[in-house]
Image: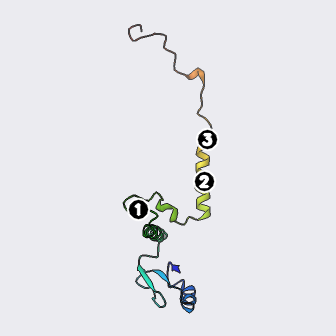
Amino acid sequence: LVVTDPRTDFQPIKESSYMNIPTIAFCDTDSPLQHVDVAIPANNKGKHSIGCLYYLLARMVLQMRGTISPNNPWDVMVDLFFYREPEEAKELEDEAAAVTDAPPAFENPAYAAPAVAAEGWDDA
């Protein structure tokens, strides 16, 4: 069992201790460590911090399994581990759609630059 905050996830931690399920927890300085088997010291208060923690944990697990090499960079971006509000994500999509659906620039041949009749610079 992997939990983000032992203080808020006390119920699953307590129930996993009844069945002897190992518990890994990202712990801050004020986190209770009762029934936590592996405590990883970290800042578990901000959503970007939690996203970075899960990114690092996933990358380390894949390196230990031998799926990816520690020498090569992982092609998965850390942004994929950040939680985004559905309304916020929809607003970003709407803004991107508005930019791509913008009307074409105004083009009127009467206001266009005159065509150059000379073939070269010397003929002008």
Give the answer, above or below, for where 67 lies relative to 24.
Answer: above
Q: Nearer the observer, disc 2 or disc 1? A: 1
Expressed as whole percent of the image width and height from the top left, the position of residue 35 reads 49, 90
| Residues at marks 1 and 3 touching, judged by CB atoms closer than 8 Å | no
Expressed as whole percent of the image width and height from the top left, the position of residue 71 reads 36, 60
Expressed as whole percent of the image width and height from the top left, the position of residue 25 reads 47, 81
Q: Mark 3 Cα within 10 Å, few/some/many (few <14, many 20+)?
A: few
Identify the residue at horizontal 43%, vertical 70% (top origin): 64
Where is mark 3, residue-wise? 102
Q: Amino acid at mark 1?
A: Ser
* Badge 2 element: helix
For the residue pair 117 and 14, the one nearer the viewer reads as 14
Q: Is 12 positioned to the left or the right of 35 in the image?
A: right
* Badge 3 element: loop
Give the answer, above or below, for where 66 lies relative to 119.
Answer: below
Give how far apart the Cα atoms at labels 2 and 1 are. Answer: 34 Å
Give the answer, above or below, for where 87 lies relative to 2.
Answer: above
How is the model colour-coded? rainbow
Q: Amino acid at mark 2?
A: Glu
Identify the residue at horizontal 59%, vertical 21% (top origin): 109
* Badge 1 element: loop
In the image, farthest residue toward the front:
66
User: Which mark sits nearer the N-terminus, 2 or 3?
Assistant: 2
Where is mark 2, residue-wise? 93
Expressed as whole percent of the image width and height from the top left, the position of residue 66 reads 44, 66
Q: Amino acid at mark 3?
A: Ala
